[in-house]
Image (cartoon, rainbow, N blue to C red):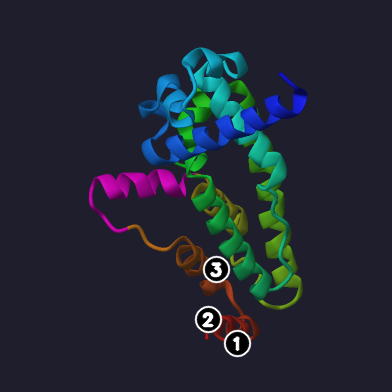
Amino acid sequence: MSKGKKQTTREDILIATRKLFTESGYNNVSLRDIAAELDISVGNLAYYYKSKLELIEAAILEKHTQEMILVPATNLQEVDTLLIHTQELQQQHLYYFRQYSQLSSISEPIKKLQAEVFQDNKHILSTTLDNLQKTGLINPPWYDGQYESLISALLFLLTRWHEQDALDKELKNETPDFRKTVWALLTPLLTDKGRNEWSNIQG
């Protein structure tokens, strides 16, 4: 088998893996299901990936290096763009976010990745709040640790939103919009200048 063909086959396998894990969840998909989706034998699939865990690790780690990178915002329009981009990323990678907690418990590489992303996102959020404060768009914290607590809440939303969404769907509850929920946390911090800018964005 040529190197080019092998690479194409791996890519097809990962695409099918993401599709099935998104539709049915990690626990409800087998190697046989993925092989059937690709119209290949389980043995052929196992030539590339010997277990379901190897598959989900490859599917997540490859996409992270390609797509899951955010940058700090310097104004409220950039914050809104960041939220929209984050929401799109979460939707594109439901196979990951819907099983965020479980995957960290079964895979050391994914657990390590999550720890690295957590620290990166913490820095991004901290830098963003500093930028907004310096430009007079949000007020200084009213008490020690206020912004640290806000960052913790935002990090929780970034990582666990779709786990809650899956539970809400199971219970037939309606999940609020991610972007609107984050703005609900941020708008009380806005100065008059910030509220004017925010109104223009929402309008």
Q: Amino acid at mark 3?
A: Leu
Using a 10 Å C-alpha cutoff, classify the residue at mark 3 as few (fewer than 14 neighbours), some (14 to 19) or many (20 or more).
some
Q: How many marks?
A: 3
Q: Is residue 131 visible?
A: yes
Q: Residues within 10 Å of mark 1 (few under 14, many from 20)?
A: few
Q: What is the x, y in percent for residue 3?
A: 76, 24
Question: Which residue matches tag 2?
Answer: 202
Q: Amino acid at mark 1?
A: Asn
Kindly identify the amino acid type of the residue bearing the numbered disc 2.
Answer: Gln
**Residue drawn at (69%, 54%) of the image:** 70
In-image side of 55 versus 139 (left or right): left
Residue 38: x %, y % from top left: 49, 30
For the point 57% across and 64% down, which residue is it? 84
Query: Within the image, what quadrant is residue 154 found in?
Result: bottom right
Closer to viewer: mark 2 or mark 1: 2
Q: 107 or 65: which is nearer to us?
A: 65
Residue 29 in the image: state x and y as whole percent.
39, 27
Seen in the picture, residue 183 relative to 120 is either above or below; the reply is below
Q: Which residues are magenta?
A: 160-174
Q: CA distance from mark 2 to mark 3?
A: 14 Å
Tag 3 or tag 1, which sits nearer the N-term?
3
The kind of secondary structure element at disc 3 is helix
Residue that mark 1 sits on: 196
**Location of mark 3 (residue):** 186
